[in-house]
Amino acid sequence: MANLTDIFSASGPMALQIKGYQPRQAQIDMAMAVEKAILKQHQLVVEAGTGTGKTFAYLAPALLSDKKVIISTGSKALQEQLYHRDLPKLLNVLTKGKKTALLKGRANYLCPHRLNQHVSHVPTDDNDIMHELAMVAKFATETQSGDMADCIGIEEDAKVLPYVTSTAENCLGKECPEYENCYIKKARLKAIDAELVVVNHHLFFADMAVKEGGFGELIPTADAYIFDEAHQLSEIASQYFGQTVSTKSLFDLIKDLRLLYRTELFDMIQLGKALDKLESSVADFRLQFPIDSIRGDWREAIKNPNITRAVERIVNDITFLYQVTKLALERTDSINHLFDRCVSLRNLLETMFDTKEVGFSYWYETTRRNVSFHVTPLNISEKFAQLIENSNAGWIFTSATLSVSGELHHFNQALGLTPVESFIVESPFDYANQALLCLPRYLPEANSPEMAHALVKVSLAMINAAKGRCFVLFTSYRVMNLVAQGLSSLVEYPIFVQGQTSKRILLEKYQRHGNAVLLGTASFWEGVDVRGSSLSCVIIDKLPFVAPDDPLLQAKMRDCKAQGGEPFSHIQLPQAVITLKQGVGRLIRDQQDKGVLVICDNRLVTKQYGGLFLASLPPMSRTRDLDKAAQFLTLIE
C-alpha cells in the first residue's frame, strides 16, 4: 500500500493536483487510523471537525487497500457528491484503477414495467402527472442507469414518481416481464462486481432488514464498512428494526389492484366493490385525527373507541379484499404479488391492537393525507453490536458531530460500539478570528408567544447588516412561517422559505442570487455546504430539543428512568447538543469564510446545562451585543 504520509504531504500528489490543497496533520492522522482499521478489521470512531478533509481521509485508504469497501453516507445528496465529485477526483490523483459503484434504494430507479403499465393506461387526468409521464417516457429511451436523479425536469418530490418506480411491496422480482431490463438488478450486479460501493444509511439498514427476513440482500457483503455522517445511524437503525404500516401503503395496494381490475379482471365486480369499501374505510380512518401533521402515542390513541372501530373496519375490509383476490389467483399470474401484499398488510394491521410488548414505542404520525403506525425498538445497541461481531469486517464511523462536551460515550453506547481506537480531530479553522457567536440580551423565553416577533427584529438587524446572506434555522414550521410573514414586507432581499420548492432548487436559487435569505427547518441544519460570502450569518431560533410530547422520546425516557438513568441528561441533552452542532456547522465551511452565529435562546446563559452546549461548540469569540454582531457583519466582503 502506498504511503499515506507521502500522499498527503506538501509535495505529494494531493498538493500537486488539487488546487488550494494544504497538508493537515489531523487529516493524515485520520487517514492512517482508517488504513489500520480496514487492514486489522476493527472498529474506529473519529469525530472530524469541519475542514479536516475527512472525506479524502477515509477515501484514500479505502481506494489503496485490496479490500472490498462499502461507504455509507447520510443522504442521497451526499452520496451523489461523494460518487460523482470526490471519488473521481481522488482516483485521478492516486492514478488508481478501481471498480466503483453507486447503489441507491429501489425508489430511485425507473421501473420499465410500471412505466409501460401507466403509459398504456394513464392513471389520472392530472395534467402535471401526464406531462411528467411523457418526460419519463422520453428519459427511458436515453438512460443507461435508470437513475431518476438524471431525469431532467423531474424533482425528487414529483407526483409521477410512484407510477414509474417500484417499492419492495409492488416489485414483481423475477416474475416481472421486464426483469432483464431491470435497472435495480443491473445496479446490484455492478455493486457485487465493484471493489468500492457508495450507498446511504437508509439503504444499508433496509438491506439488514431484508437479510434478517431471509429474502436475499440489497448490498453485497464487504471487508470494511465506512459510515460518514454517522451521528444519524441510531435513529435510522431504529426505523428499520421496527415495523410500520401506513394508509399510503394501503392506498398504493388499492391503486395497483384497481389497475389490474380495469385491465385483466374487469368482470370481477366483487373486486371493484372490495376496493371501494377498503378505500372508503382508509379515508375515514384519516378523518379520526386532526387535520394538522402530528405525532402521538398509539397506546393512548387506541383507547378512543372511534379510532378502534375505524381500525377494525379497515381490518374487516382488507380481509374481504383478501378473500376476493384469493379467488382470482388462478385467473392471472399478475395478481400473485398483489395477493402477498394484501396478506402482509392485513397481518401488520392486526399488530395495531397488540401494544403490550415492552422495550418498544408504539406511535403514530399524520400528514395532511396519511396516517402511519410505528412499532420502534427503544434500544438497538445489542442488535447492531451483534451485526458487527458476525461480520468479520472493519467498521469505521465518522462525522463532524459525534461528541458531547468532548466525549464520544453517548454515540458509542447508542450503537453498542467497543472501538479499538476513537479520537476527536479538531477543525483547522481559526474560529476565534473567523466567527463571532452572539447570544442576544433581552429576549423572551424560548416558548413565549412573543418569541416570533423578537426573532423578526433580530433577523432584520442581521439581514440588513449582512446585506442578505443569512440562514435562519428553526425548530418548527409554525415559527418559521410566522417569521417569514413578518420579514416579507420588511426585507429588500429575496427570501426563500422551505416548502416553496425542493431543497436543491432553494439552495441553487439562494447561492445564485448571492444576497438572499433562506428560512428552513430540520433538513437545512445538516448536509448543506454553502462556502464563501453568500452565507455570512446563521441565526438559530432556539436550542433544538425534541418536542417533549414526541411519543418516541417519551418512551425512551420512560425506559431510561426504569433502568435508573436520568432521562434529561442521558437522552434529551446529548441529542440536542449534537443537533445544535450540526446547525452551527453551516456557517464556516472554508478557511476563507467569516461569519456571525446568533442563537436566540436565553437558556444558554440562564440554565446550568447551557454550559454543556457552549463547551461543545467551536471556540468562537462571543458577545451579547447585537450591535457588535452587526458591525462584524458589515466588515465581511
Image (tube, helix red, strand yellow):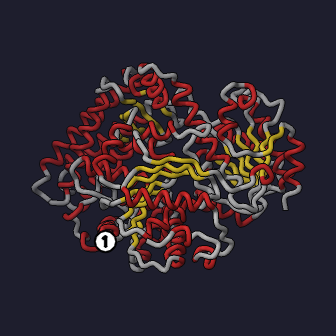
Instruction: Name the residue at 45% across, 41% down.
Output: 235
Instruction: Name the residue at 41% across, 52% down.
Output: 202
Rendered view: 134 above or below 77: below
- Residue 243 seen: no
Q: Position of residue 191 (x, y in %)?
A: 34, 68
Secondary structure at numbered mark 1: helix
Q: Residues within 10 Å of mark 1 (few under 14, many from 20)?
A: some
Q: Quadrant of the C terminus?
A: bottom right
- Residue 516 seen: yes
Q: Amino acid at mark 1?
A: Asp
Rendered view: 499 above or below 353: below
Closer to the camera, 505 or 432?
432
Q: Position of residue 476 (x, y in %)?
A: 62, 38
Instruction: Name the residue at 49% across, 53% down.
Output: 74
The part of the image, by quadrant, that contains residue 304 is top left
Instruction: Name the residue at 54% across, 36% down.
Output: 292
Q: Position of residue 585 (x, y in %)?
A: 65, 50
On the image, numbered disc 1 is attached to which residue?
Answer: 193
Q: Is 199 on the left or on the right of 22, as rendered?
A: left
Q: Is 10 on the left or on the right of 272, as rendered?
A: right
Closer to the camera, 387 or 526?
387
Q: Position of residue 107 (x, y in %)?
A: 39, 59
Q: Residue furthest left?
A: 330
Closer to the camera, 110 or 427?
427
